[in-house]
Image (tube, rainbow, N blue to C red):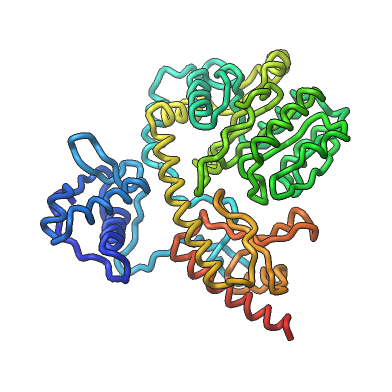
């Protein structure tokens, strides 16, 4: 594109900047080679009778979303790690994965925890993986049980700068996904004689893991500010699982005053708090409150994070930051002897973070998912209006809604399946006591979001009319 500067702007009712942005994005996705140089802002504006402000705004949006890169004194280039999209010229784009549902195919899958395949930085990951394998890795020895020192240094640096934690690399244990990290926490806390408490509604998988390790569960109701610390005073809880930055599934943020009260409770009762910071990177409205672990009194907190929601659930990498009192217990345990994640994966992630790709990737993920989030929210309000109550929005990979017009959500899901639409309900996990429709947007294109919500809403209205009769 360095020499091709004459453009045919996409038709539409949007602003000139939006049409230029869409034109360039289509070229990048369907024709451009990774690393191709874009014309300068001045050249593109002059050859196409556009203002430099219009071109600069379009380039800025493409840069923010990760489609192009800026190199000092060299200009703009198509991102090296962009996943190419190969299509025949006349083929209609389809972002929806075709799967079998009985006799139908899935056209719109609103799975609430899926990342779009285009988000993963395939080319960068491949290049760094090759570099990692070319290094002098010792495949004849057992790696450090806590994880590679360099990788743990990168995690600690990121958490301390961005999430406000207070940790050292030697407090971090690299784990193989959430279940592995939660299971390690259960073993190290050694609090089976006292109940384990979890927010309710809460993450059922955490409850299941603790149950498999011999813990008895106590449910603590969530109010508009999260769990109430006063409810713990009359209990003998020995361990507590929290998602304070973006409560799962209600989306509530636990205020600082309650966080401090919970930390004081843990200190007095000699109890442990597992802080699951599962999607703090995916906040679209404001900066998340810093981690509880970094607050004064955070010495009883085990901090758990993963790369699943922001990079990929397929690589199976998580980490657990252990408080000082549990470090010696970990060192004496069998868990300290063997690494839980393969050496090449750890080294690749270390390079990915050390060279700045991780934080650039997070900026791109936030931008792309914010657009999908906003598109989903607008579509739900436009198509269903006062028929729904928005339960949670502003973060994560799904928007949760409830019916206000008596629509039977279970029947809605059954009818939607026949039309190739997959819907997901909170009652699958919480029974009738807590119901919501979980509308995931992470795995759908913006166009598919509009189309899928419109079809779902039409079915919703038809079922509601039947209910009214």
Side of 144 relative to 45 (left or right): right
Residue extending furthest front? 257
Q: Residue at x 67, y 16 (%)?
A: 324
Q: Residue at x 35, y 68 (%)?
A: 91
Locate residue 389, reporting x and y percent. Answer: 64, 64
Name the residue nearer the viewer: 106 or 64.
64
Side of 24 relative to 125 (left or right): left
Locate residue 363, reporting x and y percent. Answer: 42, 42
Q: Residue at x 13, y 61 (%)?
A: 49
Locate residue 183, reporting x and y percent. Answer: 72, 31
Residue 270 position by quadrant: top right
Does residue 147 sit above or below 49 in this rendering? above
Side of 330 relative to 310 (left or right): right
Locate residue 74, reporting x and y percent. Answer: 18, 37
Name the residue nearer the viewer: 84 or 430.
430
Does residue 295 sit above or below 104 in this rendering? above
* Total tally of numbered discs in the picture: 0
Residue extending furthest bottom? 469
Q: Which quarter of the figure is the C terminus placed in?
A: bottom right
């Amino acid at each position: 594109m360095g020499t091709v500067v004459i453009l045919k702007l996409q038709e539409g009712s949007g602003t000139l900047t939006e049409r230029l942005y869409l034109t360039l994005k289509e070229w990048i996705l369907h024709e451009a080679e990774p690393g191709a140089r874009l014309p300068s802002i001045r050249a593109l504006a002059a050859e196409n009778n556009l203002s430099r402000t219009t071109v600069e705004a379009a380039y800025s949006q493409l840069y923010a979303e990760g489609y192009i890169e800026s190199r000092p004194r060299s200009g703009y280039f198509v991102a090296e790690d962009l996943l190419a999209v190969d299509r025949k010229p006349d083929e209609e784009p389809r972002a929806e994965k075709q799967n079998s549902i009985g006799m139908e195919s899935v056209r719109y899958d609103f799975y609430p925890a899926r990342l779009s395949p285009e988000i993963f930085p395939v080319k960068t990951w491949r290049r760094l993986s090759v570099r990692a394998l070319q290094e002098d890795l010792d495949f004849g020895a057992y790696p450090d049980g806590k994880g590679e020192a360099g990788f743990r240094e990168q995690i600690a640096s990121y958490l301390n700068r961005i999430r406000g934690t207070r940790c050292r690399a030697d407090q971090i244990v690299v784990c193989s996904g959430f279940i592995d990290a939660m299971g390690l926490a259960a073993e190290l806390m050694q609090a089976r004689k006292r109940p384990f408490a979890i927010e309710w509604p809460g993450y059922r998988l955490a409850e299941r893991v603790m149950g498999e390790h011999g813990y008895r569960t106590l449910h603590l109701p969530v109010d508009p500010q999260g769990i109430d610390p006063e409810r713990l005073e009359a209990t003998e809880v020995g361990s507590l699982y929290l998602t304070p930055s973006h409560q799962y599934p209600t989306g509530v943020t636990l205020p600082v005053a309650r966080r401090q009260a919970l930390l004081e409770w843990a200190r007095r009762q000699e109890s442990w708090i597992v802080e699951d910071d599962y999607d703090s990177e995916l906040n679209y409205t404001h900066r998340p409150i810093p981690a509880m672990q970094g607050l004064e009194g955070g010495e009883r907190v085990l901090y758990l994070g993963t790369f699943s929601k922001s990079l990929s659930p397929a690589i199976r990498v998580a980490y657990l930051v252990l408080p000082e009192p549990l470090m010696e217990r970990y060192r004496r345990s069998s868990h300290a002897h063997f690494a839980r994640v393969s050496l090449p994966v750890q080294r690749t992630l270390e390079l990915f973070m050390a060279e700045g790709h991780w934080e650039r990737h997070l900026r791109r993920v936030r931008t792309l998912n914010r657009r999908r989030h906003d598109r989903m929210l607008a579509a739900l309000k436009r198509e269903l209006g006062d028929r729904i109550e928005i339960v949670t929005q502003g973060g994560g990979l799904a928007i949760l809604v409830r019916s206000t017009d008596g629509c039977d959500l279970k029947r809605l899901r059954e009818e939607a399946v026949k039309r190739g639409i997959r819907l997901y309900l909170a009652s699958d996990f919480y029974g009738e006591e807590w119901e919501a429709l979980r509308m995931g947007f992470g795995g759908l294109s913006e166009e598919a979001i509009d189309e899928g919500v419109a079809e779902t809403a039409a079915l919703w209205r038809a079922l509601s009319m039947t209910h009214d009769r």
